[in-house]
Amino acid sequence: MIRLHDTMARKKRDFEPADPSRITMYVCGPTVYGRAHIGNMRPPVVFDTLARLIRHHYGEDSLVYARNVTDIDDKIIAKVADEGVEPSLITERYEQFYLDDTGALGVAPPSIAPHATEEVPAMIAMIEELIGKGNAYEAEGHVLFSVPSDPDYGALSRRQRDEMIAGARVEVAPYKRDPADFVLWKPSDPDVIGFDSPWGRGRPGWHIECSAMIRAHLGETIDIHGGGLDLIFPHHENEIAQSRCSHGGAPLARYWVHNGFVDMGSQKMSKSLGNIVTPEALFAAGHKGETIRMALLSAHYRQPLPWTETLLEQAKATLDGLYRKIGDAAPGEVDASVLDALGDDLNTPLALSRLGQIEDAATLKASAALLGLLEGSADDWFRGGRDDDAAAIDTKIAERAAAKKARDFATADRIRDELAADGILLEDGPEGTTWRRG
Ligand SMILES: [Zn+2]
């Protein structure tokens, strides 16, 4: 049994997929114009963990998970102008960085990764439908969604109209009939990326991208729609309005799942606040992706996660301990108490504490895999997380081998004892000397 907190219902609900043999999940993906920070890594890790849980319950092939790539956007256009290169050079570069960073954190690629630039005809079709139904209108080369045409607008965020207008940071534009109306299509200048459309050369707004891709790849109503808390308004509210209005009232998603922010001190980690930590910087400092994943899963996904150096150190120490326990065990059966914790709205802190109590290596390995942990080589972890430690130990082992070769057994024994005092145990074998942390 899986229970999920549904933002629309404001409570936890039993998860009952419409079709258990084809469960559909969509998560808003990256806009590819810069390196991701740790806050950006939380949604892919959280929803990767949920995907693992769903596949465990319903079968390996039960889930279709789509995560889009936004490769048309004003920030991308600005970056292209800065660097004076083709847009695809920017977007392909940062998409690859994103895949590398998330991959290092044990995030499996989604089943489908639709790209906005490849889905423009589907977006144009949906915009035409909305115009036809009286939910959108053309004005000065733009197409706008008419918020007053949708009486149910605002159900997800439960905002009042005044708040919505203030919150949407509404541009005062003469072509808008209502200040809350939002852009579905806008004109492109001749020197920036654009596509032919019934409204002239232009490009889609961000919100229509998700609605059109969801319908094209997953269907009108999906089981789970996910993303960060900051997307509830206006992005998800707008996705809902577009999809529901073009589908004659059919809801966009049956469960809305939102993750909280990663905080730095009292502030949300954000590029605009300039307080970001990137996976790139943490890798350079010798941290492993798995340590970052463990740290991200240490708090419940709906709660804020304060990011500190201590958090990383604790995650690493916990992983060291768990890897020592599993050795090279093959996975066995998943522990029921870990499964229960994850099934209760993905309670990863509880699941992690239960992992720590499992003594049987095979059970531990299988249970940790549900969280995307302990899938690496135990050998890497016995060798410590930091390459500089490992290099220093290898140097001492080489010195000891040289001493033995020179029949200087006193020196060889002294090196072995010094390492043992640091908790490093040596094992001599036919292939040479290996070491592990005792
Ligand atoms: Zn979206």
Image (cartoon, grey):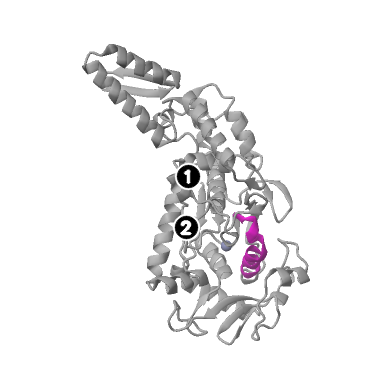
Give the vertical position of 257 relative to 325 (above or below). Answer: below
User: Which residue is located at x 43 percent, y 46 percent?
Assistant: 284
Between 57 and 197, the one lying in front of the other is 197
Q: Which residue is at 55% across, 73% downward?
A: 205
Q: Which amino acid does label 1 sit on?
A: Leu
Q: In which quarter of the image is the N terminus?
A: top right
Mark 1 vs ligand 1: CB below 8 Å: no
- Taking the image as drawn, is residue 120 in sight? yes
Write the start and end of the magenta stretch as one range.
225-244
* Relative image position of residue 47 (x, y in whole percent): 56, 48
- Could you tell which of marks 1 and 2 lies nearer the N-terminus? 2
Is 406 magenta? The answer is no
- Helix, strand or loop under label 1: loop
Helix, strand or loop: magenta stretch: helix
- Which residue is rendered at x = 75% and y = 65% of the image? 159
Residue drawn at (54%, 36%) of the image? 313
Mark 2 highlights which residue?
Answer: 35
Up-down relation of residue 92 to residue 335 (above or below): below
Assign the C terminus to one quadrant of the image.
top left
Q: Where is residue 48 in the image (x, y as percent from the top left)?
A: 52, 46
**For the residues bearing labels 1 and 2, Cβ distance under 8 angstroms:** no
Select label 1 or label 2 by which is in front.
2
Point out which mark residue 303 bears.
none
Q: What residue is shown with label 1?
A: 105
In the picture, measured across the screen, residue 125 lies left or right of residue 299, that is left
Q: Is residue 233 magenta?
A: yes
Does 395 sit left or right of 94 as displayed?
A: left
Image location (x, y in percent) of residue 13: 70, 47
* Cα separation between marks 1 and 2: 15 Å
